Amino acid sequence: MTAMKRILSGVQPTGNLHLGNYLGAIRNFVRLQNDYECLYCVVDLHAITQWQDPKELAATTREVAAAFIAAGIDPTRNILFNQSQVPEHAQLAWVFNCVARLGWLNRMTQFKEKAGKDRENASVGLYAYPSLMAADILIYKATHVPVGEDQKQHLELTRDIAQKFNHDFGKDVFPLTEPLIFGEATRVMSLRDGTKKMSKSDPSDQSRINLTDPADAIALKIRRAKTDPKPLPETELELDERPEADNLIGIYAALADISRSEAVHRFAGQPFARFKEALTELAVAKLSPIAGEMRRLTADPGAVDAVLREGAHKARALAEPVLREVYDVVGFLRP
């Protein structure tokens, strides 16, 4: 009997989780739990690579955990925890800082994007972020990691670090983790501008559907979503030149679990008003239960903390033997 494949999935506790986070990541994580041994991690150590308000960080850590549970992740069957409660992540990251090469980290495009022009003022943590991400994955010897386009490069670095560690010490300690790439990527754009990604940092709350929005807020935001003067397109090709129509059709297709071409066919030539009614009905049906459950969970922070504590206990049971193995291989004396 072959061992079940193990997945590590991480989400930053950035607050204001929205439809883009749900369709792009969280919903996919829920679907993995039947076929893999899953660890779901709220990556609060990664969050502090840029300054965070401490009270807000605690609240958003609970919010992400609540979103996981509300979306359908079962913390009794899987391991749900926040990264800082498992010190082995940081301990292995230091070893990996000594395995990774400066040249490798210099090639990481995400650091350049996040640091911007003032690179000298960026934290060392932001620069070394990929080493910690490699440790997050390899402390559990995860075989697969679901990745979006923006994280592919970091997973390649994780594989490079694993390979170099194994080579340097002459032992196959770590697997070469495989990316898990889902079908058609759901890239959710702003409801106010179809050329910009849906974002929590957009000053307009009307630009996004938050996972905590009640039904009437979802309905209002869809009704006000930007469109163009023409009816819905007759073919998928027309979507290329109509970003707002493309975005709303994409959201409908993702929520209905159908292809974009099927969604286009379903509403071809119809006025936006009629389409928006159908989209509202679908979005409310899919998202309202999640919003209600999230509000219930976040109102009881003690219960969420208990889930994270229990998850951390289970995670450490897996991480401790791996760190012991690494320390023995490296030559560290242990008690």
Image (cartoon, rainbow, N blue to C red):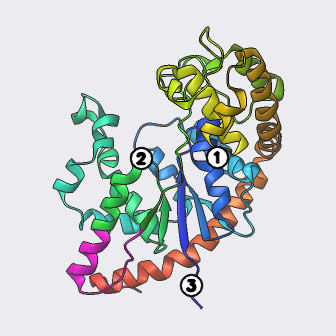
* Image marks 2 and 1: residues in contact by CB distance under 8 Å: no
Marks 1 and 3, Cα distance to the nearest angstrom?
Answer: 29 Å
Task: Name the amino acid, label 2.
Answer: Glu
Q: Where residue 320 sits: x, y (%)? A: 50, 78
Q: Residue furthest bottom?
A: 1
* Image marks 3 and 2: residues in contact by CB distance under 8 Å: no
Q: Would residue 44 appear left or right of 313 to someone viewing this image?
A: left
- Magenta residue span: 161-177
Say which residue appears at 33% left-offset and 84% top-offset: 172
Q: With respect to residue 89, does 220 lie above or below?
A: above
- Of the residues tagged 2 and 1, which is closer to the observer? 2
Task: Name the amino acid, label 1.
Answer: Val
Instruction: Tell me, yes or no, whether the highlighted magenta stretch contains residue 175.
Output: yes
Assess disc 1: are there few (<14), some (14-19) or many (≥20) residues with their C-alpha within 10 Å of its C-alpha. many
Marks 3 and 2, Cα distance to the nearest angstrom?
Answer: 28 Å
Mark 3, secondary structure of its residue = loop
Mark 1 vs 3, N-terminal side: 3
Mark 2 vs 1, N-terminal side: 1
Quadrant position of the N terminus in the picture: bottom right
Assess disc 2: are there few (<14), some (14-19) or many (≥20) residues with their C-alpha within 10 Å of its C-alpha. few
Say which residue appears at 55% left-offset and 77% top-offset: 318
- Residue marked by disc 1: 64
Q: Residue furthest left?
A: 103
Say which residue appears at 68% left-offset and 20% top-offset: 269
Q: Is residue 10 visible?
A: yes
Which label is found at residue 3? Answer: 3
Q: With respect to residue 325, does 309 lie above or below?
A: above
Instruction: Tell me, yes or no, whether the highlighted magenta stretch contains residue 126.
Output: no
- Residue marked by disc 2: 149
- Of the residues tagged 1 and 3, which is closer to the observer? 3
Mark 3 vs 2, N-terminal side: 3
Mark 2, secondary structure of its residue = helix
